[in-house]
Amino acid sequence: MTNTLYLPELREALAENNTAELREFCYALHPARTAEFMEGLTPLESWEVLRHADPAQRAEIFHYFDLDKQVEIIENVDRAEIGQLIGDMAPDDRVDLLEEVSPEVVSEVLPLVAPEERRDILRLQSYPEGTAGAVMTTDFARLSENLTVSEAIESVRNQAESSETVYYLYVVDDEDHLHGLVSLRQILLARPNVKIADIMERTVVSVGVLDDQEVVAQTIAKFDFQAIPVVDEEHHLVGIVTHDDVIDVVVEEAIEDAHRFGGMQPLVMGYLETHPLTMTWKRGVWLMILMCASLTTAMALNRYQGQFEAIAWLVLFLPLVISSGGNSGSQAATLVITALSSGDITSADWGRVLRRELLMGALLGGLLASIGLVAGLVVAPDVRGALVLPLTLTLVVAVGTLIGSVLPLVFRRLGLDPALMSNPIVAGIMDILGIMIYVEVALLLLSREMHVP
């Protein structure tokens, strides 16, 4: 819901070109709140307000605008002004934004960005999407191990304004090789004449510039870091990934996994921003795959039509059998995919996962079988017939947990996203297997009634 509290005053100040009032508005509140109160303005009106702020404050407020508003401002405002704005933004933020802007506009704006910032943009754009290099920032504080604490404090003071965080200070040599790390707390508590080399941590946890962003997020979460250094193959310090970037990664990955769990391709843009034709394609592809799986289920039913006609009461429990297999498989798939995403397990743990899920399948199958036995005794004409349902449920649930747990591990081993093995896919597989197991158990126990020699 748009916040309209200051909307009339802002429009009146714009109409009267009240510089003093507009400038005061840009500085009176936290930039996030300032951006919130500008939601009701058009992109160009919002930019007119931002013109009354200094470049650094302008970029800070702009950061909190919705992506659509940011893109429209970039594409419609004077290129020289946009060039300065891009240069003042955080390195990772401006690269992400330029990915959404039309290539023609980017080619016009980049030459107007300061050379150092332009080289930084091109360098960050060169890293593959979804890697540490694509989400890192190059604004961080460096120190030499030869500095004293008093000299380091002065150096931090000079770098603080252009650094995203100064809580962690990275110690490098003249060629930017990462040698160690020291926290701001350590520096403030140390004696002024002590060398940085004497107080720094030499064993530094880092990530590679091409490491998957999920690995980066898991590492930061594991060690509870505020930030983590990113190094290249020669151990040059090329950037850092901060905790706020990790939050964005976690949210992005969670949304993608949720879409895949639901049986559709992840959306690139928001739900309302995605074109209906694009949405149709992303949903339709998976619906067609699932429909083909359903047709296979129908073919399986057709194959065993004679057996079901011979003993009609078996049909009553068919939905129960296939849903139990699908539900148990979906449960296992969800647990394994979540554990893989959080780093709780890896593909190397397949043996332990397999043994655990076989045990769970036996226990869960036995639990459902006890209920199925009661239902079977009520409907089946004899005890032997009543045993079909509990025995089938035991086998179907065990197979469901096995399929649901193994397939995500196989996908991860193949380098694919385990979430591709979504719940509808697992349920579709178990529909077919459930029918086959059900009929084969019935044939085993009721061969005479089903006229099978």
Image (cartoon, rainbow, N blue to C red):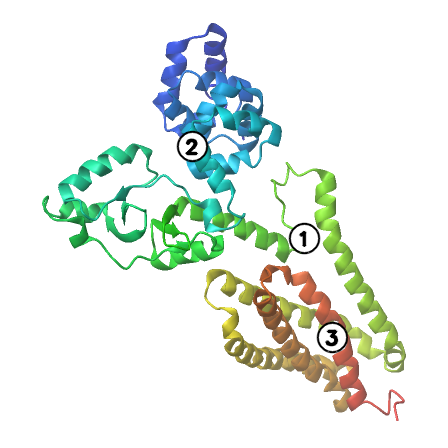
* Image location (x, y in percent) of residue 26: 39, 20
- Front of the two marks 1 and 2: 2
Question: Which residue type carries mark 1?
Answer: Met
Q: Quadrant of residue 405?
A: bottom right
Q: Where 279 falls versus 45 (above or below)?
A: below
Task: Tell me the quarter of the image containing the N terminus.
Answer: top right
Residue 300: x and y, percent?
A: 83, 73
Measured along the vertical axis of the image, is residue 192 above or below residue 367?
above
The residue that appears at 43% across and 58% down in the rendered structure is 218
Task: Please give the label number shown on residue 117.
Answer: 2
Q: Residue furthest front?
A: 175
C-alpha span from label 1 to label 3 = 23 Å
Mark 2 residue crowding within 10 angstroms, few (<14) / some (14–19) / many (20+): some
The residue tagged 3 is 433
Q: Residues within 10 Å of mark 3 (few under 14, many from 20)?
A: some
Task: Name the kind of residue labelled 2 in the image.
Answer: Glu
Q: Quadrant where the C terminus lies?
A: bottom right
Question: Is there any visible trace of residue 212 in the rendered image?
Answer: yes
Q: Nearer the viewer, residue 354 or 398?
A: 354
First of labels 1, 2 by sequence position: 2
C-alpha gap between disc 3 and disc 2: 58 Å
Q: Is residue 80 left or right of residue 53?
A: right
Residue placed most toward the observer, 406 or 262: 406
Image point 47% across, 34% down: which residue?
Answer: 94
